[in-house]
Amino acid sequence: MIPGVYGVPSVLTNWWPPAQRPWHASAIFIPKMLRKLANGQYLTLSETLAEPFSYCHSRRYLAGHEGVCVEDNKPEMIRAAVEEMLVRLNGKGPDSPEESDLRSRVDQIYESHGVFGMGCLARGFLERYATLIM
């Protein structure tokens, strides 16, 4: 969190728990994914921001009591986030209309769950999991 205090953009990976959104607008992040053990489906963003998932730090509790596993970020997703930051640092233009719309929806979801922070979900995450942004 220190780089943001000094205005240094950051790439934050394996971000968890879900309801602790990075504070600084210059940060991009990739959250860990929560998957239902029973059917393999991922939880939606809104579901991850609700109790007991939102602030839970225990993988064991989530697996045993909620039937959910916590998945680390895939290397290709991390690489894409780093590449995105490099493009941003080189003065990339504005987001596409579709990406802007997704980012607005993400902000609304976080706000509706009382989650503070201004960090942006990485573009690769938004593209891959757009159906979970609800």
Image: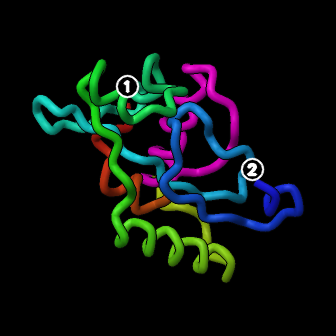
Total numbered labels: 2
Q: Are marks 2 and 1 in contact (CB under 8 Å)?
A: no
Residue 119 inside the magenta-drawn segment? yes
Where is residue 65 shown, x and y percent of the image?
A: 30, 18
As rendered, which of 76 and 95 lies closer to the eye? 76
Q: Main secondary structure of the magenta part?
A: helix
Is 32 situated above or below 56? Answer: below
Residue at image location 54% in from the left, 61% down from the top: 95
The residue that mark 1 highlights is 61
Is 66 situated above or below 43? Answer: above
Residue type at numbered disc 2: His
Query: Could you tell whether 63 is left or right of 105 in the image?
Result: left
Tell me which segment is drawn in magenta.
Answer: 98-121
Residue type at numbered disc 1: Tyr
Residue 80 inside the magenta-drawn segment? no
Q: Mark 1: which secondary structure? A: helix
Q: CA distance from mark 2 to mark 1?
A: 30 Å
Where is residue 50 shown, x and y percent of the image?
A: 45, 19
The residue that mark 2 highlights is 24
Lower position in the chain sequence, tag 2 or tag 1: 2
